Image (tube, rainbow, N blue to C red):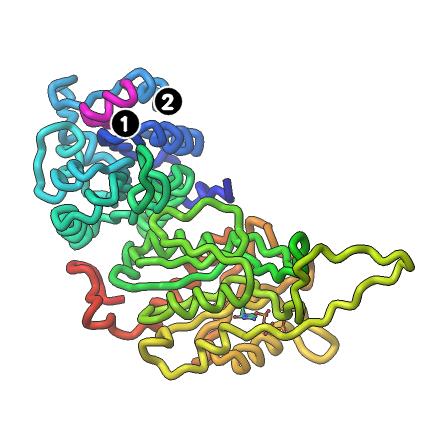
Amino acid sequence: MSTSTTDEAAPHDGERPRVVLGVAGGIAAYKACELLRRLTESGHDVTVVPTAAALEFVGAPTWSALSGKPVASDVWTSVHEVPHVRIGKSADLVVVAPATADLLARAAHGLADDLLTNTLLTARCPVVLAPAMHTEMWEHPATVANVATLRSRGVLVLEPAEGRLTGADTGKGRLPDPGEIFETCVQVLARSGGDGAPAQDLAGRRVVVSAGGTREPLDPVRFLGNRSSGLQGWALARAAVARGASVTLVAANATLPDPAGARVVRVETTAQLREAVLAAAEGADALVMAAAPADFRPTEVSTAKIKKADDGAAPPIALVQNPDILREVAARPVGPTRPGVVVGFAAETGDAHAGVLDLARAKLTRKGCDLLVVNDVSGGAVFGSPDNDAVVLAADGAAVEVGHGSKAHLAHAVWDQVVLRLGPASPDRPPRPGQPPG
Ligand code: CTP
């Protein structure tokens, strides 16, 4: 699992954040045990509210043991404590995982026929729903309308993941990785921590993030690559999901599980990265190039493994330059093929002639992007490290120092700068009602 960002999760000084974990009756209910474990181990006070159907899949003793609290699914247990009101009202976050088609329908229509739906009606905190169901149910117009209704009310409904479903079929409808749902919860809690930031200021926006490092094959077993871990791109994708965006993550050779709620396109080479980024950038509001594409590739890829020569001579490797994806997108006129805000990343060291920021300013101009996130790596590499120091340079002359912090912290600082520069949302993709236009 990647870096935990629980240091940012506490909305109350000295108090453990109170999370309600709702569990609806789907086979993925067992995965909520892992989410519960992560929440409790990272210091959250978790009350589990399963539906009666969820208890058919995972019994109350499991939820009770893992949360350290009694568990009820009806409104008739401990009535004197008025649990159907108290649990929702005192929560800092409600997350439902898995959220079935039935649960989405009941939540969208304001039904209150069990403890979980009562809790959803009384909660005034952020609500995250992680749906899991068969593709047909997810795509049914009834579910589509229910999801739209819930989103219009500010509920963060995560897109399900694609992959193997119960039985032999595959498609969209899997519960996202529980560790990644946990990361989303942490981000949402951090955003609702009272700093005045609108929680979902990317609602109605489509954003593209690239992550990881590309590999250029030399022969069937070897490649030229780099050390990029993908962590920063993951942090950007998670942060954008938590802020309500529709996110496509183009990931090169990263081994991390898909961020919850993001569409993930996995690629290997710079050519594949270019193709996927250009396709995803069509009609997008923002592109953030956090990937480290290989600048060069071997002129030829040997179809057979390159063998050692008897005389000890090493084979020459001729290289050809790869296209510069950031520059290509940024050079286009703003419109359907050029997102309104294009962001690059640069890891720089100063030299005898110029400082890091001078070199970065020159790169910003050369690349033609709107923002350039500059990491000063003079003191050592940041690849794979949980923390970053950065400055965000803007083509409009601004320079924002982000300071030392987690990759999640930098990700939100980048989205803050993107949000400031986004134009009005496209008329065919209006912001969700009740949300600011960005
Ligand atoms: N980038 C890209 N396509 C490439 C190389 C880089 O889109 N073929 C993007 C990266 O994703 C990053 C930005 O360009 O957002 C800056 O990458 P960097 O490697 O610093 O740029 P280079 O132009 O390769 O600069 P340098 O010559 O300093 O390595």
Q: Is residue 256 left or right of residue 51?
A: right
Tell which quarter ligand 1 is in: bottom right
Q: Position of residue 312 (x, y in %)?
A: 89, 58
Counting from the top left corner in percent of width and height, residue 10 is at: 38, 41
Ligand 1 contact, mark 1 (Cβ < 8 Å): no
Residue 356 — which label? Answer: none
Placement of 316 over or under 23, stated as above or below? below
Q: How many marks?
A: 2
* Corner quadrant of residue 67: top left
Is residue 53 within the magenta segment?
Answer: yes
Q: Which residue is mark 1?
A: 48
Which residue does the numbered mark 2 point to in the structure image? 66
Range of residues picked out in magenta = 48-59
Residue at the spot 17% in from the left edge and 50% down from the top edge = 144
Left or right position of 390 against 419: right
Q: Secondary structure at mark 2?
A: helix
Q: Residues within 10 Å of mark 2 (few under 14, many from 20)?
A: some
Q: How far from the left and from the top, in percent, is residue 123?
A: 18, 39
Residue shown at 19% from the left, 25% from the top: 53
Residue that appears at 47% across and 55% down: 266
| Residue 380 within the segment the image draws in magenta | no
Give the vertical position of 12 relative to 219 (above or below): above
Residue 111 visible: yes
Determine whether label 1 and label 2 are within 8 Å by CB. Answer: yes
Labels 1 and 2: the sequence-earlier one: 1
Foreground of the two, 171 or 25: 171
Image position of 223 (left or right of 107): right
